[in-house]
Amino acid sequence: MTIEAIAERVRSGARIDAADALELYRRAPTPLLGRLADAVRARKHADGIVTYIIDRNVNYTNVCVAKCNFCAFYRPVGSSDGYVLGFDELFRKIDETIAVGGVQLLLQGGHNPDLPLTWYEDLFRAIKARYPAFKLHALSPPEVIHISRLSQLPVAAVIDRLIAAGLDSIPGGGAEILVDRVRRELHCHGKATADEWLDVMRHAHRAGLRTTATMMYGTVETDEERIEHLLRLRALQDETGGFTAFITWSYQPDHTELAGSEATGIEYLRTLAIARIVLDNFDNLQASWVTQGGKVGQLSLAYGANDMGSVMIEENVVRAAGASYCMDEAEIVRNIEDAGFAAKRRNMHYEILGDPIFRERDVPRMLELATARAEGDAGVPDELMKYPARSRSGKQLRVIPR
Ligand code: SF4
């Protein structure tokens, strides 16, 4: 099919297949790809609203046994730079988040062998007891699989227990590219195969959770594999309808073992646009300004995105790989309105909560990104000693009198 014939299919609202998606992605002029994606966005969001959420992106531990070669964030077990946040530290972060109008934590971390399922359950219960209305968008599929292996329980049972403890939604991290050839090359096949990642989401959706989906592109995958990733997500969404949103970002190479260079802004916009066109059963696409910067993030609104993601109060993972962009609510709203849209706050289900909160009341401006831990803070939370460790260094820590 010619580019124009495929474009006409997209304009008519028809679904496109892998071959047509690849042809568009590779050969359509960028302005045309943008116009097609923008038309799909406008069809789904005719109200001219662009949403965002006030939440905090917290990484509860950087200790990880997975060792993905694209990751600059993790520290091996026993590293002096490894940390686990204490419950009190997390409560303080939640207090700060609520002070700026925040409604949830995005809580993700490394695959730490010294954190059993009961640690997560106790943490979630403690958060819900103190902050009953606060939401937990927590533990990406590979973390759930890690906990399932550690506890020798099926994934579905782990999800049920986490839901009972207070889990509200699962973030779509760790998807990278859902093709096992790519996952093997990225050393992330062991943490979750493509099928295993999708299965966690399937179980979560069946258990009544809504989740997000992601794609990290720009490592070793081909264009065909990017399209295959999108089609696998589309197929699961056809089956369950459980995804609220899709987020894509480019691989951030600094300080990683894999190294290499970062995809350009145009490649990001083209990838976002093709995702909007292929993922015809996803309502929401986020702009990843955290990796692309505010200006490309704003341009995303012309390439299919209808959501600016989260204000950035704290960020650790992308920063470790060299990117450090910060926008508070006022700056996000300025970018949305300058692009010609109405800015509205939302919750994790993409329900509108209201107008920008800084227009309703005074909130502190957060113009500098917080970190999980202050540099050099090697503190070990007291409650951690209650939980059995699996690693040698974790066991040693528990016998040293403190
Ligand atoms: S990407 Fe996640 S699972 Fe992989 S090494 Fe980094 S922290 Fe661990």
Image: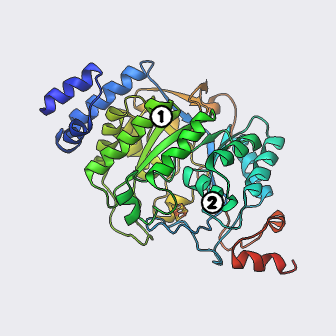
Q: Amino acid at mark 2?
A: Arg
Q: CA distance from mark 1 to mark 2?
A: 35 Å
On the picture, is 390 further left or further right than 298?
right
Colour scheme employed for the rendering of this structure: rainbow
Q: Residue 114: x percent and y percent? A: 71, 67
Residue located at (73% from left, 45% from top): 161
Identity of the residue furthest to the left in this view:
2
Q: Amino acid at mark 1?
A: Asp
Identity of the residue furthest to the right in this view:
401
On the picture, is 222 further left or further right than 240?
left
Q: Which mark is residue 149?
A: 2
Residue located at (79% from left, 42% from top): 128
State the count of labels.
2
Q: Residue 163: x percent and y percent? A: 71, 41
Q: Residue 382: x percent and y percent? A: 84, 66
Q: Which residue is mark 1?
A: 307
Q: Quadrant of the N terminus?
A: top left
Check disc 1: other Cα within 10 Å, few if <14, some if 14-19, many if 20+.
many
Residue 331 appears in the figure = no
Residue 333 appears in the figure = yes
